[in-house]
Amino acid sequence: MNYEELLLQLVEDNERIIVMTAENRAAIRNLPNIVKDRFIDVGIAEQTMIGMAAGLAIRGNIPIVHALATFLTMRAFEFIRTDIGIGKLPVKLVGAVPGFLSDGNGPTHQAIEDISLMRGIPPINIFCPSDEEDMLIGLKDVLLHPSPFYIRFSNLKSAVQHDKNFRVGKAEVITEGRDIVILTYGTLLKQAVEAADILRSEGRSVGVVNLRTLKPIDEELLKKTCAGDVLIVTLEDHFITGGLYSILSEFLVKEKIRCNVLPIALENKWFKPALLPDVLEYEGFTPEKIAGRINRELISLSRSAEYSI
C-alpha cells in the first residue's frame, strides 16, 4: 500500500475527509476521478487553499492539504497561523519534498526552516516520518488526530524494520547505545543507522532514535537518553536554528539536564542543489562524514576531560 491508496481508504471510510492541493498532485494523481467533489485543486494559490481548508474545518470537515513544503509553510504562514492555529482547526498540512528531498532545487524551493516555522504555532503538531513505510504506519493516527498537524511527506524506501506501534509523541528506538545516541527524524535516518554501524565497528556503543513526531516530542525518552555520560547527536536536514537542536536545547534547559550535545545540521546556509547523494556528500551528511564528525567530537571531549583533571 502507498500513500495514495491509504488516503483513498480513509476518504472512503470517513465522509468528513476532503483532499486538497495547490497544484501538487504527484502523490495523489489518481484521486480526483475517484473521490470527485471531495477533491479540490486551487491551483498555485497556497494562501487561498489554507483559507478554504479553515472554512471547511469550521463546518466539521477534516481537510488534508498538499503543497510543496517550502511554499506551504512560508507563503501561507500567516494563514496557517491565523486561520488554523488560532482556531485550533484539525487541518492536516502535507509538505512535499522537504529538507534534502528537494535535492535539485535551489534555495527558493528548499524547506529547511519548516520545522522552526510550524512548531512556533502553538496548536500545530509535527510528524516527520523517515520513509514511506514509517509514514504509512503513523498516517491514520495523525490524519484523524483532533489537532492540526504538519507532515513532512516522504516516499523513501525504508532503511530499517519499523515498529508498527505508533503513538503521537512517542519515538522509535532503532538501537540503544551507552557511548553515543543519534537523535534524528525524516530523510536522514538511513545515514544515522549506517554511521552508527561504522562507529560500532570501531568499538563504540551507539544508539539511534527515530523521533517520528517532533511536536509533541518524546520527553520521557529524552530524559532517559540524556542522563549519564553519553554524547547526544542531533542529525537533521534543517537549519541548526529552530529545529531538533533547538528543541533539545530548550528541553535540557527546562529540565536542568546537562549533557554533551553535537548538532549536525545546516549551519545557517542553504544547501547546494544537486542529486541527493551528491548533496549528502557535498554538505557532509554521508554516513562516513557523520561518523567522522562524531569521532572528532569524542576526541575533543576526551582531551577536555584530561585538561580538567
Image (spheres, grey):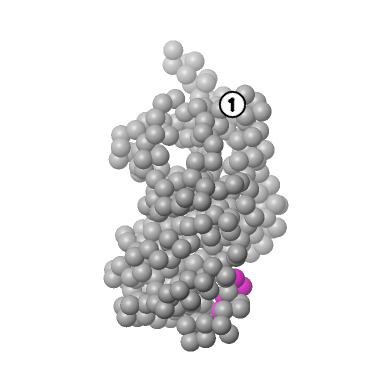
**Residue at 33% across, 77% down:** 60
- Dot 1 amino acid type: Arg
**Residue at 38% across, 59% down:** 125
Most prominent secondary structure in the magenta stretch? loop
**Residue at 36% across, 40% down:** 220
Q: From the viewer's side, name the closer residue of 172 and 94.
A: 172
Residue that carries the numbered disc 1 in the rendered image: 204
**Residue at 45% across, 68% down:** 93
Tell me the quadrant of the picture where the C terminus can be found.
top left
Q: From the viewer's side, name the closer residue of 88 and 233.
A: 88
Residue 174 picture location, percent across and down: 54, 41
- Image: 2 above or below 183: below
Residue 284 picture location, percent across and down: 63, 44
Residue 65 lies in the magenta stretch: no
Q: Which region shows up in magenta?
A: 23-27
SS at mark 1?
loop
- Image: 255 above or below 238: above
Left or right, 294 with respect to 83, comes to right
- Asked whether residue 272 appears in the rendered view, the answer is no
